[in-house]
Image: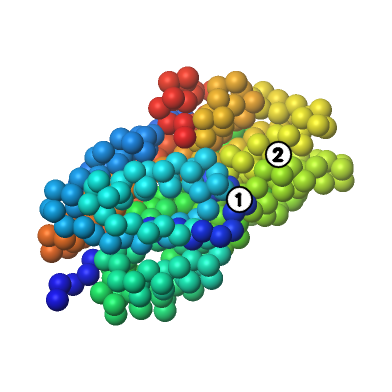
Amino acid sequence: MRKKIASIILATALLATAAIGCGGSTGGASSKAASSAAGSSAAAGSSAAASSAAAGSSAAASGKTLKVGIINNDPSESGYRTANDKDLKATFSKENGYEATFAYGKTNDDQITAAKKMITDGIDYLLLSAADTKGWDATLQEAQKAGTRVILFDRMVEADEKLYEAAIVSDMAKEGETAVNWLKDQKLDSYNIIHIQGQMGTDAQIGRSGALEKTAKEAGWKIVKQQTANWNAEEAEKIVASVISAKTDFNVIYAENDNMAQGAENALKKANIEYGEGKKVVIMGFDCNKFALQNLVDKKWNYDGQCNPFQSSYIVDVINKLEKGEKIATKKIVMEEKGFDSKTITKEDVEKYGI
């Protein structure tokens, strides 16, 4: 009986209200990617169609249908997640030789329930984007016992790496460090920061929050408000409005995704507070949505970091190697990403890298 091969793209369909972000390097310079265990790469800024065209042909070519279970976060939470879901669906199609089941969820409980059913149904690959980094050990062990191979995408989990074949991710800690280094390079007279966090416990939140907290402590920056808005624009607007109402002085908004940065901007508009390049308040976001990059071009925002949502070609490369009985050289495959500054971004960048 052939050994099942499993790649995890987690997608659990239930809760939906948020928006996720991912940062990159400053000024359009690429952050260094860790080794790519698979040959082809869905370079940052490629479209879902281009990614799926490059990635989806191997299963169909072999004449064998692979059963894939994909667990993801809610595709309506952000432009990033919508692009990510579209890319995966285009690649893991019947035409490309896959029988794919998708599930979406905002919590580990929802995602784990879906994953266990997929494993019981006999999938070859489990592709997972975990809602939370913790709590996956038992489910991954169950997959391993069933012969289902797991591939993580977008987010890491805190589990023994023997329980998954590969992880195709952004370096969230590096994203945060790069954004914070950019902020440090602005040499502001003072740093009074509103820190709007993403969903607590997610890989993205941990990486971006950790970088800011570390540097703020070392450099003597003041975080005047730190609160999660769960990736949501309306929640972010309320947080900033509360700081304004309290008459607390601030000059930087560090929002862990574009939706929350947009909500923060709405609060500033309503209070007639100037923001953007050369103005009182610096606005920083993550994701590289087109609207966010256009805000940089228009000098309304100051910085935006990219999170590459096009992971499917990397995943297919891993599956191809596993199907051939080859070892994956590097468990953690870090995608190439960029970050942008309002002083250097171009209109071409908006079209090429915006999602």
Q: Residue under label 2, please give it.
A: 264
Quarter of the image holding residue 166?
bottom left
Report x, y in % for residue 52: 30, 41
Instruction: Give the colour scheme shown.
Output: rainbow
Q: Amino acid at mark 2?
A: Ala
Q: Nearer the viewer, residue 237 or 336?
A: 237
Q: Amino acid at mark 1?
A: Ala
Q: Is residue 75 left or right of residue 308?
A: right
Q: Is residue 195 left or right of residue 352?
A: right
Q: Secondary structure at mark 1?
A: loop
Q: CA distance from mark 2 to mark 1?
A: 15 Å
Nearer the N terminus, badge 2 or badge 1?
Answer: 1
Report x, y in % for residue 240: 76, 43
Q: In the rendered structure, find residue 18 and report the number of the disc placed on it.
A: 1
Seen in the picture, residue 111 relative to 192 is either above or below; the reply is: below
Which residue is located at x 22 percent, y 70 percent? 4
Q: Is residue 230 left or right of residue 203?
A: right
Quarter of the image holding residue 349?
top left
Q: Is residue 96 visible?
A: yes
Report x, y in % for residue 113: 48, 72
Q: Nearer the viewer, mark 2 or mark 1?
A: 1
Seen in the picture, residue 224 relative to 244 is either above or below; the reply is: below
Image quadrant containing the N terminus = bottom left
Q: Is residue 211 visible?
A: no
Quarter of the image holding residue 162?
bottom left
Q: Nearer the viewer, residue 294 or 64?
A: 64
Q: Is residue 234 left or right of residue 67?
A: right
Q: Nearer the viewer, residue 226 or 136?
A: 136
Seen in the picture, residue 254 relative to 277 is either above or below; the reply is: below
Q: Which residue is the extreme one toward the right?
A: 246
